[in-house]
Image (cartoon, rainbow, N blue to C red):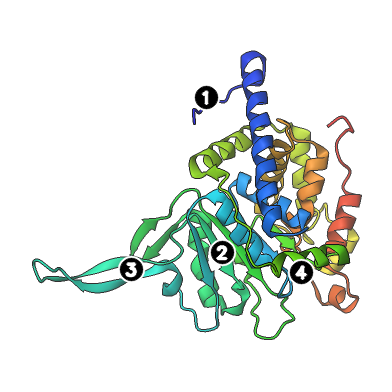
């Protein structure tokens, strides 16, 4: 598609932007319609995954087995015209099983032998890292360079990954047998940590009816890679006024027990707070939410709406909080109440 230069939103540029936002709204509606053919309910999680896609970032989905985490991500892979790869994480999975490895091969013509890099399943557009916390941290870390730099290095040689590139990971609750806690440095690479829960009774009945039919739903392709990359450009062009940006920074800083801005309840109950990457993701996710909502400006409500999935895996409680059964979500809600937003007009 044509990609006009992004400048301001006055005059002709404003009309063009309004047209693009209308088209994106139609595309979003088609995506949601197709997903609903395979996945019942879970609107909040679906919305968070879409925000992460249009922001060009990664998403971690946590929930007990049997809640359609894998089905949700696979359905999105079927709807978007992108290369979908699934990696099933197991205790015996090795880093080379993810990134790829060099193999010794013989040229059929010259009969000379040499090493050739054989790509691993990480070389795709949408990577489903299924049950990522069922493999030890050494293998989990194989994703770090890919998630941050969009590349992998094997035997000293760097290989670029396709674009766009997303890691959508599922994990089971850490309390379950056979799980390993994700390292904090890796959790920080995920923009969102989404929680998927049990469906209401009526929706569960609908799931049973849908999954016991003789035929599976056929999902139609909605969007290709070039179009998605262009919409990601639009997201990054969304203006954010300085008070909103400072608000996001104050929220992240208030979760750090060593910060002067931290409330007493944070100093008493938090071992580690959100990094600077959290401030970046608060603003970027808010931009994507605004665009998907048909707006070319970020409001206070956008920041507040994305704060929980951005922060819940970055705020680590200490022993005092755990003994009192205070969760990171409890503390984030109190932080949002404690940090005064800018004027109501924003």
Q: Nearer the viewer, residue 8 or 75?
A: 75
Is the residue under label 2 in contact with that under label 1 (CB below 8 Å)? no
Q: CA distance from mark 1 to mark 4?
A: 47 Å
Which residue position holds label 1?
A: 4
Q: CA distance from mark 2 to mark 3?
A: 25 Å
Is the residue under label 3 in contact with that under label 4 (CB below 8 Å)? no
Q: Nearer the viewer, residue 102 or 123?
A: 123
Image quarter for residue 266? bottom right
Q: Earlier in the sequence, mark 1 or mark 4?
A: 1
Q: Secondary structure at mark 3?
A: loop
Which residue position holds label 2?
A: 128
Which residue position holds label 3?
A: 155
Is the residue under label 3 in contact with that under label 1 (CB below 8 Å)? no
Residue occupying image coordinates x 82% and y 46%: 304
Q: Earlier in the sequence, mark 4 or mark 3?
A: 3
Q: CA distance from mark 2 to mark 4?
A: 25 Å
Q: Secondary structure at mark 1?
A: loop
Q: Earlier in the sequence, mark 1 or mark 3?
A: 1
Residue 307 in the image, given as x and y percentages of width and height = 78, 51
Which residue position holds label 4?
A: 208
Q: Seen in the image, is 161 located left or right of residue 16?
A: left
Residue occupying image coordinates x 67% and y 36%: 26
Is the residue under label 4 in contact with that under label 2 (CB below 8 Å)? no
Image quarter for residue 119? bottom left
């Amino acid at each position: 598609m044509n990609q006009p230069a992004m400048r301001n939103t006055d005059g002709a540029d404003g009309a063009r932007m309004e047209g693009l936002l209308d088209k994106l709204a139609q595309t979003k509606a088609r995506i949601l319609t197709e997903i609903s053919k395979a996945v019942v309910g879970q609107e909040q999680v679906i919305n968070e995954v879409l925000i992460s896609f249009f922001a060009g970032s990664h998403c971690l989905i946590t929930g007990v087995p049997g809640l359609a985490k894998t089905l949700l991500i696979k359905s999105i892979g079927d709807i978007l015209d992108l290369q979908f790869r699934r990696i099933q994480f197991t205790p015996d999975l090795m880093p080379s099983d993810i990134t790829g490895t060099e193999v010794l091969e013989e040229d059929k013509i010259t009969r000379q032998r040499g090493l050739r890099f054989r790509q691993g399943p990480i070389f795709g557009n949408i990577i489903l890292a299924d049950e990522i916390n069922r493999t030890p941290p050494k293998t989990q870390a194989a994703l770090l360079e890919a998630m941050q730099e969009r590349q992998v290095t094997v035997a000293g040689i760097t290989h670029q990954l396709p674009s766009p590139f997303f890691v959508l990971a599922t994990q089971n609750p850490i309390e379950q047998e056979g799980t390993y806690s994700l390292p904090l440095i890796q959790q920080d690479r995920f923009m969102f940590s989404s929680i998927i829960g049990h469906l209401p009774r009526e929706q569960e009945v609908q799931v049973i009816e849908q999954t016991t039919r003789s035929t599976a739903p056929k999902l139609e392709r909605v969007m290709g890679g070039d179009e998605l990359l262009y919409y990601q450009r639009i997201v990054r062009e969304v203006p954010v006024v300085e008070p909103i940006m400072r608000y996001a920074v104050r929220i992240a800083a208030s979760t750090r027990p060593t910060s002067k801005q931290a409330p007493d309840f944070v100093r008493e109950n938090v071992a580690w707070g959100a990094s600077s990457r959290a401030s970046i993701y608060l603003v970027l996710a808010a931009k994507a939410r605004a665009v998907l909502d048909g707006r070319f400006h970020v409001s206070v409500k956008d920041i507040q709406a994305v704060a929980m999935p951005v922060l819940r895996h970055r705020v680590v409680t200490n022993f005092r909080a755990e003994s009192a059964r205070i969760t990171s979500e409890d503390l984030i809600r109190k932080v949002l109440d404690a940090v005064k937003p800018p004027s109501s007009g924003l």
